[in-house]
Image (cartoon, rainbow, N blue to C red):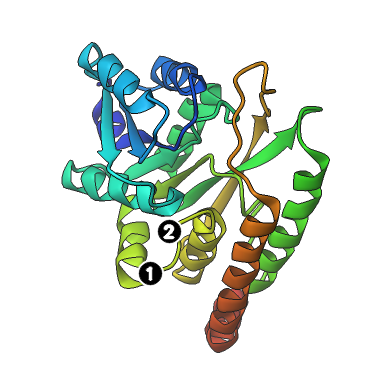
Amino acid sequence: MTGTGHAHQLVLIPSYNPGPKVYETVAAARRYWPQVWVVVDGSTDGTAQGLAELARGDTGLRVLVLGRNQGKGSAVRHGLEAAEAAGVTHVLTMDSDGQHPAQCIPAFMAAARANPGCMILGKPVFDSSAPRLRVRGRRVSNAWVNLETLWIGIGDSLFGFRVYPVAPLLALMRRQRWMRRFDFDPEAVVRLAWLGVRPINIDAPVSYPSTEEGGVSHFRYWRDNALLTWMHGRLFVGFLWRLPMLLWRRLH
């Protein structure tokens, strides 16, 4: 470890059947950060064994394995529980499929050290590999999140490359049963914003590796959009009864 601040921050990678791309993702994360944890979320593609083998030769890599697939949010929570027990105060989450920019890890961690009470959110800068349907679709979720937080300044609700303060996020997840699957990323930022955790946005390039490059996607358009619709329905109800508090906060 390289300094006290680094000892309280780690990279957390939830992983479900990512294929060999996960090894590149982990290697890139380790290149830029001394502590990387992977939560294998019931993968059946052999990567749990491969990652465990890597960890045996790398003291900066820890692999946590869930016996069955529970969803991204559940995998993140499992990592957060272990992180808190280890004295970690902030985690940077990134996907295992090679989409997120490992080279941005140091800048995001530095921003979190300078603003420990904030959430540091990646704002994606898409290249030509981005599926047009998904880019357009995320605008809908972003519009809802802006409304639900009274335009507090969340640059992107779905981009999972971000730094969370562990204590408030874990307290949220312990109190309620949502945020366990694909709905984790947008619901986490809304609920943290309701608690007064301020967002700081930093541009981050995102790429979508092709199938030939080892890219794997578990996004299912109808299933996942139905989940997001249900989530925003819940959040909008929560927003309505929090509206007086949110208005007071914005005016003061």
Marker disc for residue 177: 1
Judging depth in this view, the residue of 113 and 217 nearest the camera is 217
Q: Residues within 10 Å of mark 2 (few under 14, many from 20)?
A: some
205 lies above or below 202:
above
Residue 79 % position (x, y): 30, 44
Residue 27 % position (x, y): 42, 16
Q: Residue at x 46, y 53 (%)?
A: 118
Task: Give the secondary structure at mark 2.
Answer: loop
Tell me the CA gap for discs 1 and 2: 7 Å
Q: Residues within 10 Å of mark 1 (few under 14, many from 20)?
A: few
- Displayed quadrant of residue 175: bottom left
128 lies above or below 189:
above
Q: Report if the CB atoms under discs 1 and 2 are less than 8 Å apart.
A: yes
| Residue 231 visible somewhere in the drawing | yes
The N terminus lies in which quarter of the figure? Answer: top left
- Displayed quadrant of residue 4: top left
Marker disc for residue 180: 2
The C terminus lies in which quarter of the figure? Answer: bottom right
| Residue 149 visible somewhere in the drawing | no
Under mark 2, the amino acid is Arg
Marker disc for residue 69: none
Residue 142 % position (x, y): 70, 59
Q: Residue at x 69, y 57 (%)?
A: 222
Horizontal arrangement in the rendering, residue 42 relative to residue 218 (left or right): left
Under mark 1, the amino acid is Arg
